Amino acid sequence: MNWFSKPFFSNFKGSQRDPFMRLALLLTILIVPVAFKPGMMPKPIIEKGLFCLEIASKALGGTDQSKVCLEKQQKTLSEVFLDPLKRALPESPELILVGEGSIRASSPPTTFSYQVLGALVGGLEIEEDKKAIIEYIVEDGETLSSIATRFNISLNTVLLANNLTKSTQIKPGVSLIILPVTGIIYHVKSGDTISVIAEKYKGKTDEIVAINSLPEEGDIYTGDILIIPNGVIPAAPVYVASQSIPVASSYFICPVVSPCRKTQGLHWYNAVDFSHGQCGELIYAAAAGTVLNVKLTNSTSRGAFGGAGNTITILHPNGVVTSYGHIAVSLVTPGQSVSQGQPIALMGGKPGTAGAGLSTGCHVHFGVSGAVNPFR
């Protein structure tokens, strides 16, 4: 057939008036150039950046060449993972440590933005946001009972989460920990399993897995903070993780580059925030240890991983666990040994980005389980 002959084009006579044909042509014009835009295949760039990271990590704080290399690596990864125009790679799956020396991937349960869905239907309450533990500032005239009613949880839930009694008088300005559902908070210890915890505190395994965004296998790690829906304290309750391990003032270093800028003081749970106001900033291991878990999600929900968003946890030789929340990119994997001051992640926390969690801006949420936070 002659593609340029009059008979061929005569088949489309009048199609230029068809609104659907016009829409198809418009989409073709707009989408095709974007799909083949130069620079959308960042794999070589990433490989170069990771090679640079390896050089810099081996000589951290050493030669000028290693420092320049590290800066280039940070810039490369920041551009690839934080710039939506260059983000051609699929989302990273959650990495789960199996046994002592192997890793498996667990894909996030969703691959779309709940916030976008809510915007489309208008006024839809985002279910994932209900998974976040929040800190609520008491307002004038409020009581413990009215606050419990406001958040649709039991009064006992508020009392247990905050170590209060029914006779406690609260004042405006006081900060309270509010769970997303009626239940209790539990701090995971060595040897714990979901089934044992569920049996001891009268919870349901599937509900614990769901509310805490755990993988189907229910893998948990020392230092994790779990919500037990409808959980009941059997006896002699301990509401907060032990902080009895003595830690020297020099044991931990600041997890961000100097100057060590703290943007929020002690808050839930036993954590402080650090930032210089820019996403993509390097985050460092506060002390030597072993990476316990790396939790990553492509969800933009504020309730991602309890509000902490993408999180790395590290077990240190003294038994203390540190956590680094609201990260954008992890540079480590579960089971990996890290040294003090080693780059472990790039800072995230920008609202609306994947894994930001309950955050108002770029920062790292540095938490300590098992000891006093030295930066409180």
Image (cartoon, rainbow, N blue to C red):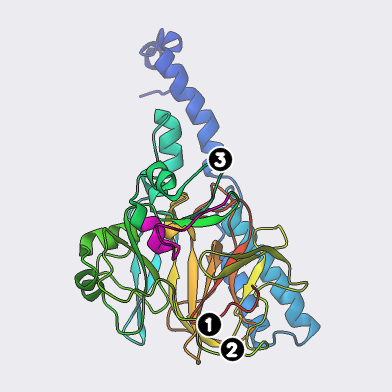
x, y percentage for residue 12?
Answer: 39, 13
Residue 211 in the image: state x and y as whole percent: 32, 57
Residue type at mark 3 is Val
Residue bearing mark 1: 371
* Quarter in which the N terminus is drawn: top left
Q: Secondary structure under badge 3?
A: helix
- The part of the image, by quadrant, that contains residue 281 is bottom right
Front one among 228 and 50: 228
Horizontal and vertical percent position of residue 230: 26, 58
Q: Which amino acid type corresponds to the residue marked 2 in the rendered image?
A: Val
Q: Looking at the image, which residue is at 63% across and 61% down? A: 363
Magenta region, residue range: 157-171
Dot 2 and dot 1 residues touching (CB under 8 Å): yes
Please name the residue that numbered disc 2 is placed on: 247
Q: The residue tagged with tag 2: helix, strand or loop?
A: loop
Q: CA distance from mark 2 to mark 1?
A: 7 Å
Question: Which kind of residue does numbered mark 1 sit on?
Answer: Ala
x%, y% of residue 332?
Answer: 51, 76
Identify whether 115 is placed above or below 48. Answer: above
Magenta run includes residue 164 = yes
Q: Residue furthest right?
A: 64
Q: Main secondary structure of the magenta part?
A: loop
